[in-house]
Amino acid sequence: MKNNKFIKFSLTVACAAVLAACGSSGGSNNAAAEEAAKQQAAQQAAEAKLETGNGAPNVGGKFVKKTQSNLYVGEDTNVDNKSSTKVTSMTEELHPSLDTVVVAIPLDSTKAPQAYLEDFDFRGNTANTSGTHTLEHIYKTVDGSTTVGDVRKNGEASTKTDTKGKDTGVAYVYEQDRLNYTRKPEGKNVVDTKDARTDARLAGSVAEVYGHRTFVDGDSEVKNIADGDTVLANAPFTAKTADGKYTAGSKLNYVQYGRVTSRLHAVNENNLKAGKDVAQFGTKVASYGGYAENGTEDNYFFRGVNNTSAEQLSALPGYYDTTDFGGKLHYQGHAVTYNLDKDFKLGAGLPNALGAEYALVSGTHVAADIDLASQNVTGNLYNVWKESNTQQQEKEHNVQLATFEGNLANDGSIVGTATKYDDTKGTLKASLYGSKAQELGGAIASNDTTNNWGASFCAKVQNPEYVAPTPTPTPTPAPAPAWGERTEEVKK
């Protein structure tokens, strides 16, 4: 078996045309191990700057879950199903098209090109009723090679090489009126009657992605000038319905999040075509992979444009009305998860009505609160279940999947910890986006890289803008009379 020469890496990519991304990885000998240690040390130094709020802009984060791949994700190069050792930061400003995703660099040399996925381009996806979109002219090959392609219409562009792949790939996206975004199959105990996004149905898909630039007008083959964004809702559970429940979708303007799958297992750099000449040592175009297929890597990410600056964050107190949210900013949204689903269970004993039935209403939701005074961040991932008893009474329960807490840095980045419902621990990385911190993107990932779990998410602020009460006008006093009545005659 060939050694995989690529690693997951998250130090900066020296170019705005390509998404800066993930962790670190390598070969199987001592030299490779030493190189990995150097890369990890550099990574930790960059991370330390970010976590104190003194580093480069934090535009996103990413971690990897392997499926029988030897991609190095922080521990070894074994063929296994391990995940990254942490969520790593993206620090380079993104090209506004968001049509590339960096996935790896070779370990053997620091003077080596980064590998990225090309044509992660949703132009042409102009209806949010089907729940899927087909990515065109991509590389999705059995062996991960990308050297054989066709000539691209209109040739090379800022984020596109002059050749294109010959394959297509299904990407799952937001679907209007869908409530079940979990892996639980449709049926008697699921309210949503739409076909569920089970692992079996997702198998072979190249992505599940939501938010900014997932519904876009235009031709995905030609130069992407980052226009054409539609007004369609692109993310679930980010708004209230008429009955006050967070089951409506809305449009995210800054954050994109979800999962994209690559195929880097045992791939040699020579079998990848040259990418855009934008990084110091060049780039390579990697192949997409199919979800749940052996030899692939699921990249869970959040990324965004217009991340909230320190100046914007400092001006935020007083902008929103926090009266109904305990003095905090409150966010609601959705998460793409793996190994986090959980059915509703009674706390103890039998219910009073043995005929009670339970059904999944919606999921997976994200709720988060930010206290601007203390800079504490808390939140959780949950599914909503409905309990119906023999008296025809209904009651909803939030079934908690994971919690997280962290600290908000002055630059809008958030670092902290996460805990799954079974009390296993993980890490949190998140960031605020928009001039008024309108969107919160983030990811959580388990510390255990073998029995792993994780999620990427985005949530939208729910507080209304603060409106100062209209001052009560001071009444104008009645003028003093100039004359008064007199009944006596004036005597001389």
Image (tube, rainbow, N blue to C red):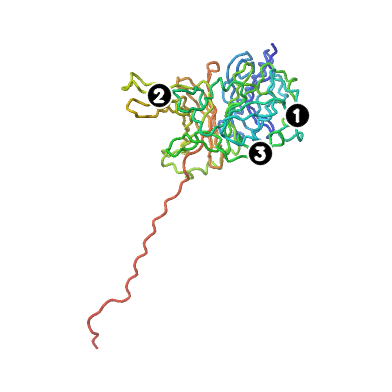
Q: Residues within 10 Å of mark 3 (few under 14, many from 20)?
A: some
Query: Does residue 65 lie above or below 395 as drawn?
Result: above
Tell me the amino acid under the disc marked 2: Tyr
Q: Going from the N terminus, do you reach mark 1 or mark 2 first?
A: 1
**Mark 2 = which residue?**
358
Q: For this rendering, which residue is in front, 67 or 250? A: 250
Q: Which quadrant does the C terminus fall into?
A: bottom left
Position of 471 compared to 124: left or right? Answer: left
Is residue 14 in sight in this rendering?
A: yes
Residue 450 at x, y = what percent? 55, 15
Q: Going from the N terminus, do you reach mark 2 or mark 3 first?
A: 3
Dividing the picture into quadrants, the one containing residue 72 is: top right
Seen at 69% across and 14% down, the residue is 3
Query: Mark 1: which secondary structure?
Result: strand
**Mark 3 = which residue?**
226
**Mark 1 = which residue?**
163
Query: Mark 3: which secondary structure?
Result: loop
**From this viewpoint, which residue is outermost toward the top?**
1
Q: For this rendering, which residue is in front, 394 or 326? A: 394
Query: Does residue 488 lie above or below 345 as drawn?
Result: below
Task: Give the spatial CA distance, label 1 vs label 2.
Answer: 53 Å
Disc 1 vs disc 2: which is toward the camera? 2
Disc 2 vs disc 3: which is toward the camera? 2
